[in-house]
Image (cartoon, rainbow, N blue to C red):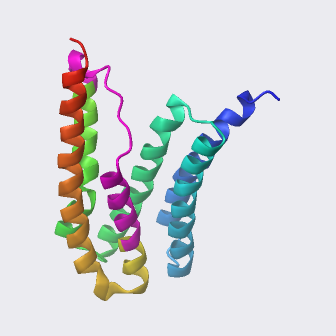
Amino acid sequence: MDRRPLLFLPSLISLTRLGMAAAFAMLPSPATRIMLVLAASLTDFLDGWLARRANLATKWGALIDPIADRMFVFTAVCVFLFEGAITTTQYFLLISRDLMTAVGFLVARVVPTLRPITFRARMSGKIVTTLQLAVLIAILMRPELVHPLVLLVGATSAWAIVDYTLMLWRERARTPA
């Protein structure tokens, strides 16, 4: 069987999160937004699981999956900021890891000695994403949990930033100049 058409399936699943992000911004119903957060969480799990399980992993998929995750979370957090559901401080705590990761990725592409390094998902980043999604649900269902969850996201984001930085340094040390 020719697997080439299937290679794009995990990436297509990832790309659905971009549509979900747009729907999240346009549809103010809390029930709809809860369903979108749950669907985004499910597709985040499903695309990676399918890529690994069916040996359908691609470089494109490895790039688009985290971008789709970030765009969904960023859109939802922006919507909640504009609606007054979170404060500016909470907003920055929720996206701090994403901002630092984006800066790190850009630096790694600009600095010639860092270009060959392959970025891989780390457990610290997966935990931050899970907690970010939990905050989105809490905003909609349990607002009293938002503050402690945001603080937890901030702390795990700091851990993830250190974790990814150390990985980058270790990989750089292993990569011939």
Quarter assignment of residue 72: bottom left
Please name whichever residue, 121 or 73, is drawn nearer the observer in this view of the structure.
Answer: 121
Residue 48, compared with residue 176, is above or below; it is: below
Assign the N terminus to one quadrant of the image: top right
Please name whichever residue, 74 or 50, is drawn nearer the observer in this view of the structure.
Answer: 50
State the residue at coordinates (30%, 54%): 124
**Residue range (magenta):** 109-134
State the residue at coordinates (62%, 47%): 50
Report x, y in % for residue 53.
Answer: 62, 45
Residue 45 shown left or right of residue 127 in the figure: right
Quarter assignment of residue 133: bottom left
Q: Residue furthest top?
A: 177
Residue 141, compared with residue 171, is above or below; it is: below
Report x, y in % for residue 119.
Answer: 35, 34
Question: Is the magenta region chiefly helix, strand or loop?
Answer: helix
Assign the C terminus to one quadrant of the image: top left
Report x, y in % for residue 44.
Answer: 52, 55
State the residue at coordinates (54%, 69%): 38
Residue 120 shown in magenta = yes
Residue 40, compared with residue 134, is above or below; it is: above
Residue 85, compared with residue 65, is above or below; it is: below
Residue 43 shown left or right of residue 111 in the figure: right
Please name whichever residue, 98 or 157, is drawn nearer the observer in this view of the structure.
Answer: 157
